[in-house]
Amino acid sequence: MLNVALTKGRLEEDTMELLKNRGYGIEEWESKGRQLILQDRKKNVRYFLVKSADCLTYVEHGVADVGVVGSDVMEEYGGDYYDMLDMDIGICKFVVAMPKGKEANYESGHLKIGTKYPNVATKFFKGKGFDVEIVKIEGSVELGPILGLCDAIVDITETGTTLKENGLTIVDEVFDINAKLIVNKASFRIKREQVMAFIDDLKGE
């Protein structure tokens, strides 16, 4: 049996739709309620739902043979696994946003940057040679500059609508994000045939 860790939240629905289109049985998923572990007897696959950062942990430690996770999470947390497939789901991007009218301050000196992704933000601004202070925010990052906690934010956006609704404007783009298929290194040796069949199915081959 192939054990597959799937990321809760924004990737969950897209991933299950992709699996359904590739002939995988997701009937249990469609009526799962609060279940976190589901069987696909049609393909001899077991899925379990985890938080994004935990997807990396489950795959790295071999509890999951493969996982579907956003490249944003991989960039923030790193890990020891194989990055096997770029997927055409979970498409969005990291951006820098500031209150509208403050754009001129972006390159003017020391900035406080609010973000859920301190490693991504630190690396980005270091590469630009900016002097910044990173403030870790776990909740609604958009509140940071509105309430004066920070000057700007680094966050994920798909359409930019939420930023606009909160009076923020994009002043820079960090990098594009998409879902990735990652594979445990030992599983790739032991279950290579099943892993590769799964990858080929997701690729539509």
Image (cartoon, grey):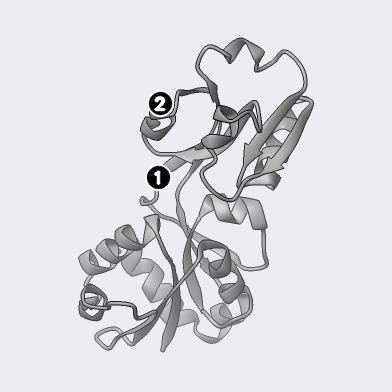
- Of the residues under marks 2 and 1, which one precedes in the sequence? 1
Residue at 58% in and 30% down: 147
Are circles 2 and 1 on residues that touch, CB within 8 Å? Answer: no
Residue 32: quarter of image: bottom left
Residue 179 is situated, as x and y percent measured from the top left of the image, at: 44, 54
Q: Is residue 58 left or right of residue 177?
A: right
Q: Amino acid at mark 2?
A: Lys
Residue at 37% in and 75% down: 197
Secondary structure, mark 1, is loop
Report the disc number at residue 46.
Answer: none
In this rendering, is residue 31 above or below 120?
Answer: below
Question: Is any atom of residue 3 visible in this view?
Answer: yes
Residue 177 is situated, as x and y percent measured from the top left of the image, at: 48, 44
- Give the labeled residue for mark 1: 91
Residue at 42% in and 64% down: 8
Q: Is residue 126 left or right of residue 42?
A: right
In this rendering, is residue 118 above or below 148?
Answer: below
Q: Amino acid at mark 1?
A: Ile
Residue furthest front in the image: 147
Secondary structure, mark 2, is helix
Residue 85 is situated, as x and y percent measured from the top left of the image, at: 47, 59
Residue at 24% in and 76% down: 26
In this rendering, is residue 170 above or below 17?
Answer: above
Q: Tell which of 98 and 46 is nearer to you.
A: 98
Question: Is any atom of residue 175 visible in this view?
Answer: no
User: How far, Cα to Cα, is label 2 from label 1?
Assistant: 19 Å
Residue 92 is situated, as x and y percent measured from the top left of the image, at: 43, 41
The quarter in which the C terminus is drawn is: bottom left
Q: Which label lies toward us, 2 or 1?
A: 2
- Give the labeled residue for mark 2: 164
Q: Tell which of 16 and 154 is nearer to you.
A: 154
